[in-house]
Amino acid sequence: MQRSGSADSKPDDTFGQSVEQEVKRFLSRERLRFDDNTASYNQPDFTLYFPADQLFFLEVKEKRQSYNMRNWPAFAPEADLFILDDLTVRKCLAYSPYAGILVRNNLLHIYRFFSVIDLALMPKLRVNRVIERETQDIKGKWLINLQNGWEANSMDESFWCIQHYLRDLPAILFDHHPCYGNYVGEEISSGGVVRQPAR
């Protein structure tokens, strides 16, 4: 699968269908084997079977409309804000590190991929949202900045990001010594004294 460099590769009806349907159409077109778990409460939306028996578990979400910023704490500019369920993130953690979330921003016609490692390490703001039912309920939400995800202009590019993450995963987990990630909203300072290991 080649990385596409142009948004022109998107079908005309891309944003007129759900992101779940777009992913299914893409996977079928690319002849990538997958399990559709979108009806499950306990599994990520898709189980992807890449070559060499590489599994990946993908949740898909979409930003359909602007948020009313009077209803949420200030965390990121509205154009960059996305609100995730805490449960969605925990679902990904159950399949870590081979999991992530793809967000389709229908307002800007772009995609953002977040690996489970990005979800764990990037800045976020967690809040509880009250739900008025017959009995009051609470649902955990994450406010995140979409700029902290891998940007893609098409589904092809989105899957290139996933494959790139899988390729680099051993190095990310075991070889990267500084704090991982360069996230918007975070400034990493220094601490401690200079360590001088015995020569």
Image: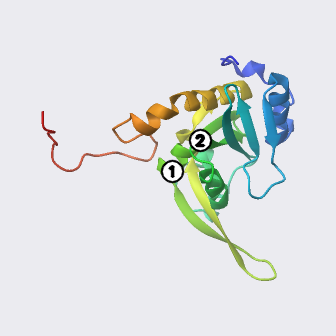
Identify the image quadrant of residue 52. top right
Q: Residues within 10 Å of mark 2 (few under 14, many from 20)?
A: many
- Amino acid type of disc 2? Phe
Label 2, label 1: how many angstroms apart (C-alpha)? 10 Å
Whole-percent x, y for residue 125 in the image: 52, 59
- Check disc 1 and report the residue beneath it: 120
Residue occupying the point 68% across, 18% down: 4
Q: Quadrant of the N terminus?
A: top right
In the rendered image, which quarter is residue 25 located in?
Answer: top right
Residue 129 coordinates in the image, percent (x, y): 65, 69
Residue at 36 percent of width and 45 percent of height: 187
Q: Is residue 25 left or right of residue 76?
A: right
x 77%, y 58%: residue:
41
Q: Position of residue 165 (x, y in %)?
A: 56, 32
Q: Which residue is mark 2?
A: 114
- What secondary structure is marked by label 2? strand
* Residue 177 at x, y percent in the picture: 34, 37
Viewer can see residue 68? yes
Dot 1, how many residues are within 10 Å of its Cα: few (below 14), some (14-19), or many (20+)? few
- Label 1 sits on a secondary structure element that is helix
- The reply to whether residue 182 is in sight is no
Q: State whether residue 52 is above or below residue 60.
A: above
